[in-house]
Image (spheres, rainbow, N blue to C red):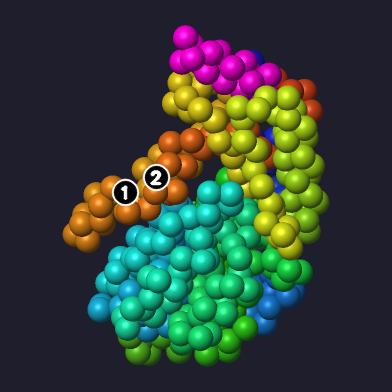
Amino acid sequence: MKIPIINSKRQYETIKSTVEPKVLEVMRSGSYILGENNKMLESELAQYLDCKHTVLLNSGTDALHLALRALDIGQGDEVISTAFTFVATSESIGIVGAKPVFVDIDPDTFNIDASKIENAITPKTKAIIPVHLYGQPCEMDVITDIAKRHNLFVIEDACQAIGAEYKGKKVGTIGDIGCFSFYPTKNLGTMGDGGMIATNSQYLKDRIIALRNHGGAIRYHHDEIGVNSRLDEIQAAILRVKLPYIDKWNEQRREHASYYNELFSKCSLIETPKELDGAYCVYHQYTIKIPNRDTVHKTLSDMGIGAMIYYPIPLHLQKVHAQYNFKEGMLPNTEKNTKLVLSLPMFAEITKEEQQQVASAVIECVEKTSSAVAI
Ligand SMILES: Cc1ncc(COP(=O)(O)O)c(C=O)c1O
């Protein structure tokens, strides 16, 4: 039995007949950068998210880093975020020369514990980056209220959460800037790298358009150091084919999550994901908490089940941030949950039979390893 954590080829088969002619059309057009597909996709995505502007970029990492640049955050500034995320979140803070300040997570959602943010604010704090991890929205009304009272910017890391909603609003449109990734394994993934920012601010949109193109809004006029971070036309054309399916695919992920919950309900050793009140979670990952996680992970991998640990080392303990001397023990919930989480195969096209096989294997491994420990 081989069940990968995500099966991109299976999704490709469902859109092959539409996407292939679109890619060919771009190849034949001779227009490869910042063409009609970029223009159309930006407006289609803004309409989908119900926000005023989107700007397409080369990656989610660039979206985060350019969002910080556009808000003039840099040397001497502090940015509050979570250590329970992919490195790109805190790496972006480092790229602009600011210091990441990590707040512990809520163990129920794996997201930043909004009730602990205020304690971490100092005169140097400029922004908060909540990460909607695994497609689960953060508690945005608490976070935006804190930001308003302390005059801070909110940059949402929605790289794993396109289509997720918090109290009826799409995540990534609630703060000042939302950052998205179109990396192939994302809920809306392209066939290479890709990213985007969303904002309701004309000023921030213009700033990011300039930053993505060598710091100049007018050709060969460069006002500041920028980057080359454009989404190529082939990727934009692919995303235009996929975008109309995103709600259906997210809804299928939610159905699969409910089915996993049902299958796991017979094993009390397995903790299934919880959803925040008012949140529409899009299950970029379906992540359980289990005892003896590493043994179970290895057994499942040996059986051909693509379970993954997102993420094995929290960011405050990564060498990349060694200069700040963050200590083990400073984020107890983050550190504890890092050792418990296991993400299971999750993609829109997974079948009920595959889910049953995954669930039986997980339950068997968890029960076996736990009784071995008890002896
Ligand atoms: C939470 C989070 N932030 C940022 C990123 C960076 O996105 P990209 O890989 O497109 O640079 C990712 C991608 O995995 C992510 O999961």
At x 61% / y 70%, what residue is drawn? Answer: 140
Quarter-of-image position of residue 226 = bottom left
Marks 2 and 1 in Cβ contact (< 8 Å): yes
Task: Where is residue 204? Give x, y as percent.
Answer: 51, 85
Task: Where is residue 350? Give x, y as percent.
Answer: 73, 33
At x 77% / y 32%, what residue is drawn? Answer: 262
Q: Which residue is the site of mark 1?
A: 329
Quarter-of-image position of residue 306 = top right
Q: Tell me the amino acid under the disc marked 1.
A: Gly
Residue 50's place in the image compared with 312, above or below, is below
**Mark 2 and mark 1: span between their CA atoms?**
7 Å
Q: Does label 2 or label 1 sit earlier along the sequence?
A: 1
At x 63% / y 73%, what residue is drawn? Answer: 141
Is 74 or 359 nearer to us in this picture?
A: 359
Is 336 on the left or on the right of 96, as rendered?
A: right
What numbered label is drawn on residue 317? none
Q: Which residue is the site of mark 2?
A: 335
Is 306 on the left or on the right of 82, as rendered?
A: right
Near mark 1 (Cα within 10 A), the count class, few <14, some 14-19 or many ≥20, is few
Is residue 145 covered in magenta? no
Quarter-of-image position of residue 222 = bottom left
Residue 137's place in the image compared with 19, above or below, is below
Is residue 373 covered in magenta? yes
At x 37% / y 61%, what residue is drawn? Answer: 102
Residue 24's place in the image compared with 5, above or below, is below
| SS at badge 2 | helix
The part of the chain drawn in magenta is 358-375
